[in-house]
Image (spheres, helix red, strand yellow):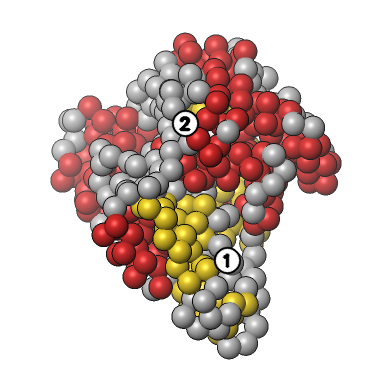
Amino acid sequence: MSAKDIIEKKRDRGELSAQEIREFVSGYATGEIPDYQASAWAMAVLLNGMTDAETTELTLAMADSGDRLDLTGTVDIALDKHSTGGVGDKTTLVVQPVVAACGLPVGKMSGRGLGFSGGTLDKMESIPGYRTDLSTREFLAQLKEVGLVLTGQTGDLAPADGKLYALRDVTGTVPSLPLIASSIMSKKIAAGAQRMVLDVKIGVGAFMPDIDQGRALAEIMVQIAALAERQAVALLSDMNQPLGYAVGNALEVKEAIATLHNEGPEDFREHCLEVIEQLLILGEAASNEKEARDLALSKLADGSAWDKFRALVQAQGGDLSFIDNPESLPQAPIQVEVVTERAGYLSEINARVVGETAVDLGAGRQKKGDPIDPAVGIMVHRKVGDQLAEGDPVFTIHANDQGKADAAHAELFGALAWSDTAVEPLPHSYDVVK
């Protein structure tokens, strides 16, 4: 069947066969199918959707468009964790070492930040010397020897997805749930994941603005995993306010280090534990959530989770003196406190506004290739539901330029909303989809 026939079949709400999907993906990946036809096909998918079977075939076809990492000879169970992105989301930096300390190796390929959502690799690169460009050989060797890897994408994994993702970004087809789900899952499968926890963020600071859309995406991805003979659990977690207190690369590394020392913000610690619980159950290190939590807490308490983080940093060339003394990590020369201009209860700390302000300071990228300043960012001292008096501190801006600090000061007031009556705190998470 020609590309035109496949486009017309999806336009007319037909269900594409596995062969038709694979022919289209292969043709687009090799350049035989031009961008204008792929754009028309993506719009047809956006408007008419896909069945679970179609979405699974699309996922597998994109995973098969390049290299596939085989972890079966390296680990007994290939675990992975993926977040759909959020403000202050440094969860991987705590989750991976704790899970590895519980005896389950975790090799993760992560990404860089683009827009208001920070990237895990950018955070780790605030540790001088830390390498994020491991080869496949280095990845497999470190996973076997250390039980922990956190690096950038190795090899040519799911190249069809990368090409289609760029096209969706400029053709108004980003919101398609089948295309979002297949994009995420194709990279996980190509990277060798057999069992995974998917952290689906919901709210103003996330890609999914409401719980209904978040649940729909989670259900599709969990079903893809099942049809592809893998296991996935999805957490629906809140991203209406920043996660933890730190937003910015070195600031978030410091907060992760504090959490690995049994300190850190309560909401961030709780979220990490919820993710860890599901990974330990999937990895058969625990039979239920209570048993998993008790095991995780014991690894935080006895220091073995921190030891794993140090082993990770050392294995990838990072200077341990910077994490052993976090105050030596990059620090911004300008720090400005933002205080309240009224008394009341905080009813909103808009995560998107905070994230975009951090990008303007230099903590993130407006476009691919923009430089990152690891030192800049924002500390958020309050949570929704807190009662404040006039003049209480809400934010501390960490900047490298006074003009940027002044602009951030003005922008951050727009992140706040107030109530004269008590406000309920936001939940850490909404549900688990299995």
- Secondary structure type for disc 2: loop
Q: Could you say where residue 3 lies in the image, as x and y percent from the top left?
A: 22, 40
Q: Could you say where residue 132 lies in the image, as x and y percent from the top left?
A: 42, 25
State whether residue 309 appears in this view: yes
Q: Could you say where residue 90 lies in the image, as x and y percent from the top left?
A: 53, 44
Q: Is residue 251 left or right of residue 78?
A: left
Q: Residues within 10 Å of mark 1 (few under 14, many from 20)?
A: some
Residue 9's place in the image compared with 253, above or below, is: below
For image coordinates 65% across by 83% down, the residue present is 422
Between discs 2 and 1, the one toward the N terminus: 2
- Quarter of the image with the N terminus is top left
Compare residues 59 and 74 and report the one nearer the observer.
Answer: 74
Compare residues 349 and 75 and report the one nearer the observer.
Answer: 349
For image coordinates 29% across by 30% down, the residue present is 26
Residue 129's place in the image compared with 24, above or below, is: above
Residue 177's place in the image compared with 392, above or below, is: above
Q: Which residue is mark 1?
A: 382
Residue 427 sits in quarter = bottom right
For image coordinates 64% across by 43% down, the residue present is 258
For image coordinates 47% across by 31% down, the residue present is 127
Q: Is residue 428 left or right of residue 216?
A: right
Q: Could you say where residue 249 lies in the image, as x and y percent from the top left?
A: 44, 43
- Secondary structure type for disc 1: loop
Three-letter amino acid code at the position of disc 2: Ile
Q: Is residue 206 left or right of residue 347?
A: left
Q: Which residue is mark 2?
A: 127
